[in-house]
Amino acid sequence: MKKFRKSVSFKSIFGTVFLLLFFAVIVSFIGYRGFTDSLLEQFADDAFHTADAAAFYVDADRMDEYIASGGTSEEYVQVYNTLDTICNTLGVTFIYVIQPDLPDYDHITFIFSGINHNTDYTHYDFLYYRETTNDDYRTKYRQLYEGEADHAVVVRDKGYIETGSHITAMIPLKGSDGQTKAILCVQRQMDDLTSARRSFINKVLLTMIILSLIVIAGQSVYLNRVLISPLHRIKTEAARFASENTVSENRLSDTIKDHDEIWELAESIDQMELQVKNYVEDLTQVTAENERIGTELTLANRIQSEMLPNIFPAFPERKEFDIYASMDPAKEVGGDFYDFFLLDEDHLGLVMADVSGKGVPAALFMMVSKILIQNFAMQGNSPGKVLEIVNEQISSNNREDMFVTVWLGYLDLKTGKIIAANAGHEYPILRKPDGRFELIRDRHGFVIGGMSGLKYKEYELQLVPGSTLFLYTDGLPEATSISGELFGTDRILSTLNSASSNDPKSLLDAIDVSIDAFVGDAEQFDDLTMLCMQYRGAAADEESSAPAAKEMTVAAVTESIDKITQFINDELAEAGCPFKVRSQIDVAIDEIFSNIAHYAYAAGVGKATVRLEMLEDPCGAAVTFIDRGKPYDPLAADDPDTTLSAEKREIGGLGVLLVKKTMDDVRYEYKDGQNILRFVKHYTKTERS
């Protein structure tokens, strides 16, 4: 049953019957109202005619005498009998004459009252009978007495079912002076009206039931032929095609005779089956092709990634430098590339490049450019000469007008000097001896592949142990947020300078985190490629047997003491430093860093670096504190006299004195705008667990 209620047949028949019933109700209501109004008008006219006839026998000027007679005078009886005769002759229910109380009209007094003896009403002597009026009657009485109306009618219609409906016609009885002396009322029952209306409604209902049954039967047959049956065939065919995905041998439109909208729908289904079949076949081929292309792009991405140095640490046996790089292409393959390679035992080649365009063409161009640059560099050519030769090679056969920007530099691992040339690439960034990263605005040559016959100027950069070189492509400063704002070189510098660690991998990780937070959900439009190299100096190779120094840069506030202490403690424990020595070093760290936090940056908060070096012969640890605050030597003050009592001794100095007493060597210097304080503590190793 529930399924049937959802069918088109049910909905169509129900809709038709509903509209028919709605139309019938409207028509019946209009007919009912017209029929009722017509009968009421007829009843009212008859009542007024009766009232006019009865008024002829009542002398309004003698109303007071009628009342004074007490209903016993011959004239009163004659009038009364006349009214009673008229009432019974004309078939009305009541004819009565009343006088309302003036001026409020709240009560009426009956003077004459005739009644139809064929009704069920009891005859009463209504002379002097007083009755309270209601608002409807009171209004009518006032209008008749005050001359606002020359007749009035009151209808009490109790509707379709109940009996007792009646109509009362009223006319004023005026004396010779023109004033109303009383009101003559004629009341007539409307039982005939109620009966006629009931008969009318019953006939309408019966007619509607018969018509509805006829419509339902006829509509069912008609709809089934022209709508339901064709739609059912269409539904069946659609379900079959969805499950089998094969075109039917018999066209669906051939089974429908009438070329109407249903036939057009069937024709569309036939065409859809053919189109879907062809689409699925084409889609299968396209999907297979896309899978092949995707596989090839994945392989190309792997080949491209393997062509770039991607194993870190890249040169674990070399202590003069540390290097780390990454490339994140915007598509499956990209046009950016980096490279680094040892030209000989003392020189390291560094390359950062960006090919115009994206995708496979840029990747192919990138591979050619990388191979050419490395080959000509390994042949002993200077950076400028390498760019010159590569530009000639590419420009001579560059039909696609592609180009590549390149920064190429050679680092002398003994001296820290870099000889570099720039072919239209981004400015490099260098960490200076003061610990700050700065943009090196070097002179740019023209891009590689732009035109032949170009020369490229070289320039020098001097690195000192601890210096860090950061290279990148334009995808980094041009990374765009959802709002369209560029990341920019200022944010690059800010991120590098605020990084908690200066080793190359940590710096690149910090950039990645900053880029992700800035870009958010915006799409990556360009490749992101970065290379970071930290120069440690030639001495690092000579002292390769000793562990490399480790450092941490933090905000110069007292809240950083716990972080620094934990960092130093973990390294000392790993190196086998005894607990007693670690405790003494903890006290020294607390005292020295507290001085930096309170006095170094009076105008605000700055940075401070703590570096730990493990010493081998003799075994020990060297801790260095570096800040760029105002010059201050805590060792210059005189040591407090500990022989004096606490009351006589000057405040301060005990912490520094304790550091001097417990550490084996404590030194301070102010160099290159930095406060540098270093202490050394020797110890005998314990067995590590």
Image (cartoon, rainbow, N blue to C red):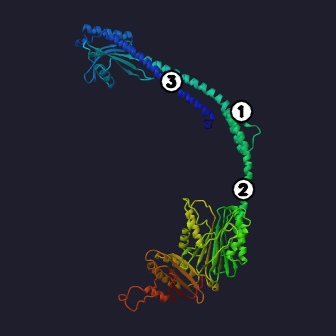
When asked about the image quadrant of residue 381, the answer is bottom right
What residue is shown with label 3?
28
Dividing the picture into quadrants, the one containing residue 67 is top left
The quadrant of the image that shows the C terminus is: bottom right
x, y (%) of residue 217?
Answer: 63, 27
* N-term-proximal mark, 2 vs 1: 1
Q: Please, what is the three-letter code of the amino acid marked with disc 1? A: Ile
| Residue 144 higher or lower than 268, as above or below | above
Q: Which residue is outermost to the right?
A: 249
- Gap in angstroms between the C-alphas marked 1 and 3: 41 Å
SS for callout 2: helix
Q: In screen coordinates, is 33 left or right of 1?
A: left
Q: Which mark is residue 256?
A: 1
Q: Where residue 255 sits in the image (x, y, percent)?
A: 73, 33
Q: For this view, does 88 lie left or right of residue 684?
A: left
Quadrant of residue 402 within the rendered picture? bottom right
- Residue 243 location (% of width, % of height): 71, 44
**Crowd around label 3: few <14 · some 14–19 · many ≥20 (10 Å):** some
**Amino acid tagged 2:** Asn
Q: Name the residue under label 2.
A: 290
Mark closer to the observer (2, 3):
2
With respect to residue 291, does 429 lie above or below?
Answer: below
